[in-house]
Image (tube, rainbow, N blue to C red):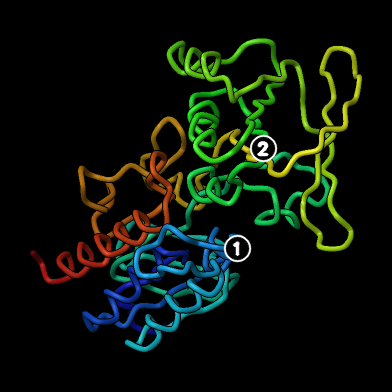
Amino acid sequence: MSDPLKVVIIGSGPAGLTAAIYAARAGMNPLVFEGSQPGGQLTITTDVENYPGFPDGVLGPQMMEMFRAQAQRFGAETRFEHVTRVDLAQRPFKIWVGEELTLAETVIISTGASAQLLGLESEKELLGRGVSACATCDGFFFKDKSVIIVGGGDSALEEASFLTKFAEKVTVVHRRDEFRASKIMQMRIFDNPKIDVKWNSIVTALTSDPQNGGLTGVVLTDTQTGAKEDLPIDGVFVAIGHKPNTELFKDYLPLDAKGYIVTEGKSSRTAVEGVFACGDVQDSEYRQAVTAAGSGCTAALDAERYLAGL
């Protein structure tokens, strides 16, 4: 069995690859298991215009390739492999990819969170081409257009209000006849002349342009009568929640009520010494590339100081 590595990073995206950059520059020779979606959620995002340093914007996959190349330049090893099992009960920690075992003195978890989607045919193909799970990321691209947002919680209504800064019209589609969001959020929706609500409705199909493949509309189905309505639309924002990718770690680390890994204060430290978490796997509030990258830096610095006994 080979000697333990100083640091193994599970997951990629802005958090994991930033952690790899810092860990590699610190001489810790990190190994990154990039997971089932190398590069994270940005690999299904087209234009990224809110990340500092790219005044003309940058394609999400291109930016993640730049992150990866920078980490590799300093000696990080990246593998397009999915971790199937871990043992964080004692050091050295054990990480398996299938039957292949890797030992680690420290582990940085950056497995992210997956947006819960509608489960419709062609939905994933239309991500970044009219379908989005992040109004903050993509709202700008729908200036003076008509969009819908699916959901009824605080996040959905907050994003609906945000979208009115750009879109000409925002329609909230909700499967019930009342919102579960807070009263103050509901009042902001009802008082906004740019927002309409479709009650007792669900999106049952997406339509697209056969020429360019972009979204052209949706089919709404009334949950009470079953009646269908074709609704031409420029964009669909799905706000029915995110699911943190924490299944591997639930037996070893405390999770909050939403399933996110709990970290100590402003640090990336978890309840297990030598295990750190960064990015969307422990951040249920901001979920931005730049905040994820910052937390990846924090995790690498925390791991370095832990190994140094500080």
Q: Is residue 25 above or below residue 191?
A: below
User: Label 2, on which residue?
Assistant: 147
> Could you say which is closer to the camera, residue 297 or residue 105?
297
Decide: few, some or many residues near mark 1? Use Cα within 10 Å; few <14, some 14-19, many ≥20.
some
The N terminus sits in image quarter: bottom left
Residue at figure coordinates x 68%, y 48% from the top left: 131
Residue at figure coordinates x 78%, y 32% from the top left: 203
* Left or right: 296 in relation to 197: left
Asked which secondary structure carries label 2, the reply is strand
> Could you say which is closer to the camera, residue 68 or residue 301?
68
Mark 1 and mark 2: span between their CA atoms?
18 Å
From the top left corner, tell me how far across and down residue 192 is, in percent.
Answer: 53, 19
Q: The residue under label 1 is which amino acid type?
A: Thr
Discs 1/2, front: 2
Asked which secondary structure carries label 1, the reply is loop
The numbered dot on residue 46 is 1
Q: Is residue 86 above or below residue 184?
A: below
Q: Is residue 222 above or below residue 269?
A: above
Residue at figure coordinates x 69%, y 43% from the top left: 235
Q: The residue under label 2 is which amino acid type?
A: Val
Q: Quadrant of residue 204?
A: top right
Decide: few, some or many residues near mark 2? Use Cα within 10 Å; few <14, some 14-19, many ≥20.
many
From the top left corner, tell me how far across and down residue 234 is, in percent.
Answer: 72, 44
Residue at figure coordinates x 48%, y 67% from the top left: 57
From the top left corner, tell me how far across and down residue 200 is, in percent.
Answer: 75, 16
